[in-house]
Amino acid sequence: MIKKVSKHIVQNEPLLFEQSSPGKIGYQLPALDVPPVDAERALGKGHVRSEIEDFSEVSEFETLRHFTRLSTWNYAIDLGLYPLGSCTMKYNPRVNELVARTEGLAWAHPYQSEELSQGCMEVVAVLEKALAEITGMNAVTLQPAAGAHGEFTGILMIRALLEARGNPRKKILVPDSAHGTNPATAMMVGYAVENIKSNERGMVDVAALAKSMTDDVAGLMITNPNTVGVFEENIRKICGVMHDKGGLVYMDGANMNALVGIARPGDFGIDVMHLNLHKTFSTPHGGGGPGAGAVACVKELTPFLPSPRLKRDGNLWRWNYDLPQSVGRVRAFYGNFGVLVRALAYIMAHGSNGLRQATMDALLNANYLRTLLEPHYQIAYKAASMHECVFSDDRQSPMGVRTGDIAKRLIDYGFHPYTVSFPLIVHGALMIEPTETEGKRELDLFADAMISIAKEVEDTPELVKTAPHNTRTAKVDEVTAARKPIVRWKPEPTASKAAD
Amino acid sequence: MLATIGLRSEEELIAHLPADVRFDKRLNMNDGVSEFEIVDYFKNLAAQNANGYPSFLGAGVYNHYRPVLVDAVVSRGEFLTSYTPYQAEISQGTLVSIFEFQTMVCQLTGMDVANASMYDGSSAVPEAAMMAVRITKRDKVLVARTVHPEYREVLRTSTQHQGIPVEEIAYAKNGRLELDDLKKKLTDQVAAVIVQTPNFFGILEELKEIATLVQSKGALLVVAFTEAVALGLIEPPREADIVVGELQSFAISPSYGGPYVGIIAAREKYIRQLPGRLVGETTDSAGYRAFCLTLATREQHIRREKATSNICTNQALLALMATVFMSVYGKQGLRELAEHNLAKAHYLAGKVKCEFDTPFFNEFVARTNGKSPSQVNAALAEKKIIGGLPLGRFYPELKGAMLLCATEMSKRDDMDTVAAELA
C-alpha cells in the first residue's frame, strides 16, 4: 500500500521562450546619473549586436510563477528521504544559507585588499584547521570546486612529490568498486589506470594489490568506507603495501560522513584525500552543485598544495604566492567560499560531540534499513555496513525485474530512488544511504515501500516494470534523447515567419 | 532501532573497526553552538571585511545588482535540496531550468550547443583546450596574454601532464592581442587559440580577423569571457568554435571568489566532445514533452578513464540564479543594463588617464600618475571606497596602472572621488 503520498493537482508550464511577448519587461534600472554613451560610436559598428535573438521577454510575476511551477515538479530532501547511496542527501540547515548571505562576506571581492578581507580569510583558516583535525591531516586546501576537482588536485600533488623524488612513475591503481571519477582523474594527470579487483567480502584484495604494486605505480586511489558501504579493514596493510614500494595512497572522501569522529584517515595511513563539503558537511546539492572539494594531506605533501596558501603575518592573514613546489592553481581565486561558509557553520553547530553523533546516527539508520530489508533483498556482501547498505536485484531479476525498475516503482511510493546499478562490481546494485537526519518514521515508511515492492515483484511484476505510474511525467524516453540530441529550444520556423 | 538490529548499544555499530584505526579521543574543537551564536559569529567576521564599500574592482568578478526574485526562487527547497536530476520523472523542474539555461547561453554567445554549466570560468578554459586537442588531434595551445591571468594559470596546471604545451601570445600597444605574434606562433601543431573578449583590460578583441587567421590554419578558436553583461550589447563571438566564460555577473554575489558558474558552448558538430552534464529534450511514455540528462556516454561514470573529463557535477543552483536573472532582465533589460555599464565606465574613463586608446566595455586600464596604485587604493580606502586592481602583480610592465571597473551600481559621486584620487 502506498502510504506516503496522494495525487494532487500540478500546474503545467511552457518554456520561458514559449510565453514570451515582444516588449514585455520585468526589470527597472535606476535613472542614469551620467551621460548616455552611443554604443556604436564607443565600440565600433561591427562590435554591437542588433539584439539577442529569441531571448525571452516576460514580466516579473511571470518569471516568479514560471520557476515556482517548475519547482513543484522536483523531488527534494525537504519533501522526504532521498536515499541516494554515496551522495549523502541530508538536511541542509537554513542558517547556513543565511550566514553565507551576510553582506560583508557575500559581497567581498576576491581582489579587495587583504586588510579589508580579514573576515573571509579567517573563515578559510578556521575551516582548514577544523578539517585537518577531522581528517588527522597536516594541512588542507579549500581551493578545489568539487570532489572530482579535489581528486585531480590530490593526484597532481602525488605526481609533484614523486617528480621531486626523481620519478613520477606511470600508473595509478584503482579498485574496481571505485567511483568513475577516480580513473578519469588519473588519466588527466597523465597516469595509466590499473584496476584492482575486490575480494568476496567487497574489500580490496591485498594479495592482488601487492602483486600489482610495482616501481611503476605512483599510488592507489581508495574509497573508505568503500562504495559497498564497507570499511576496508585491511586499510593499514594496504597503505603499508603502497608505502613500502614508494607509492602513495589517495583517499576518495565521498564517504567521510561514516568516519567523522570515529576514525581519521591521517591516522590510518592515507597520504592525501578530498572531502565533499556538499556531502559530509551538508552544503546543499542545489540540483547538482555548487560543491566544494577540500583536499587534506600529510606533511610531506604540504609543499605541493595549490597556490596561494594562507599565512599569518603579525595580526593579519596574508595570501602567500611564494610556493616554489606548489602544483599551481586549480581554479581562479581561493575556492567556493560561499560553500565554505556553510560548511563551517555546520561544523560549529555540531561541535566535537555533535559531529561524532551525526556519524553514529548515520550508521544506525543504515544498519536499521539493512536489517529491515535483508529478508526481502539480497545483501551484496555480508560484511558489516557503515553509513550505507548495498543490495543486488538477484532475487527480483528472475521475475524480469531489475534494480532500475524497482527504483522507478519507489517513485510511486513517494520516495526518491536509491543509487541504481552502482557500484559496478555488484550485479544490479541498489545502493541505499539514509543519512543521519532521517527519523524512524520516515525510515519505516521507506522500508514498508521497499518490502511492498518486493511483494509486487512476485505478484504483479508488470506493475513494477512499467513504473512510475503516478508521476506528472511518465517514464522518460532517454534513448531517443541520446540518439537525436535536442539540447536547446529553437523557435518553430513557421512561428518566426509569422512574427516577421 | 538498536533492538531491531540486534545491538545493545550504539558503540556496537563500530565494534568491527580494527582497534588500530579507531579514533578514541575527542576531536579538538568546541562544542556545538546555537543558531544565534552562529549568526553572530559570521556577522562579526563580516565586520572585519569591507562592508558596503562602493567598489571599482572587476577583473573577472563584477558588482551587479541581484534582483530579489533570484533568492526567492533558489531558496525553494525543491531547487535547493534536490540532487543531480538522474531520475527524470521527479526532476523535471531542474531539467527544464537547465534546458532553458543551455538555450540562453546559446542565444547570448551565438553558439549552437551549451552544457549544463562548469565549475567556473577558469576551469572551463582547460576543458575547452582539451576538447580542441581531441577534435583536431593536435597538441599545442596558444593563449593570449590578455586572457585573465588566473585563467591562464589554471590552464597550465590542468594541461601540464597531458602533453599539451601552452604558449602565450603577446598584446600590442593598443591592449589587443598582437596579430604578428599570433601569426608567428600559429603552426600546424596548434589545436586551439584562446582569446578573451572583452579581454582582461576590458578591451574588445578583433575576433573576425583572429578567427580567419586561426581557422585557416586548421586550429580552433576558443573565445573566453568574464563579463557576461557585455553580451547584452556586444556582437557575440559567432566566429568561435568553442566559447567558455563566467556568468558570475548574472546575480551571483562576488562571495570572495566563488562559487560561480562557468559555461562551455560550441558548434553543433562538437556536441559529443563537450565535457560535463547535458540536458536534452525527449518525450515520456504518454507522449508528452519531457527532459532528461543525455549523452552520458561521454562521462566518467560510464566511460571511466576514457571519459571526456572527470567532471561529474555542474553548478546547477548558480546556473538557476543566472537563468532567473536572464529572465528578469530579458531581451530589452540585458541590453539596457549593458548600456548603463558602458555609460558609467566611459564617464569614469573620461576623467582619468587611460593606458590604451581602444574600445572597451566596462573596464579599462588607468595610469596612476606618479602615485603607486596601492597608494591610490589606500587613500580611497580611507574614504571607504575600494579602488581598482593594481596590475603589476600580473603584468610587471603595467606596475604604474590599475584596472578600473564601473557598473550600473557605480554612483557618479564615487566615480568623481576615484577620478580625483587618480589625478
Image (cartoon, helix red, strand yellow):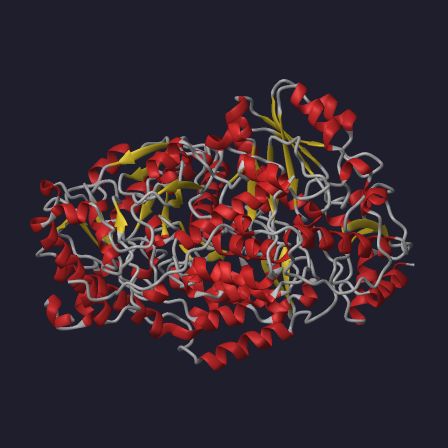
Q: Which of A76 and B159 is in front in this view?
A: A76
Q: Nearer the viewer, residue B131 or A404?
A: A404
What is the x, y in percent for residue A410?
23, 55
Q: Is residue A191 above or below residue B395?
A: above
Could you tell me how many numbered marks the image carries? Answer: 0
What is the x, y in percent for residue A92?
40, 67
Picture quarter with the C terminus of chain A = top right
Question: Which of the 4 image quadrants contains residue A191?
Answer: top left
Question: Which of the 4 image quadrants contains residue B18?
Answer: bottom left
Please indicate, yes or no, whether residue A487 appears anywhere in the rendered image. Answer: yes
What is the x, y in percent for residue A256?
34, 58
Q: Residue at 34% across / 73% down in the picture?
A: A354
Picture quarter with the N terminus of chain A = bottom left
Q: Residue at 68% across / 22% down in the picture?
A: B186
Q: Nearer the viewer, residue A20 or B206?
A: A20
Q: Which of B279 and A83 is in front in this view?
A: B279
Return the residue found at the far front. Answer: A498
Please indicate, yes or no, whether residue A327 appears anywhere in the rendered image. Answer: no
Question: Which of the 4 image quadrants contains residue B294?
Answer: top left
Left or right: B146 as drawn, with respect to A458? right
Left or right: B14 as drawn, with respect to A164? left
What is the x, y in percent for residue A181?
38, 42
Left or right: A339 as drawn, with respect to A1? right
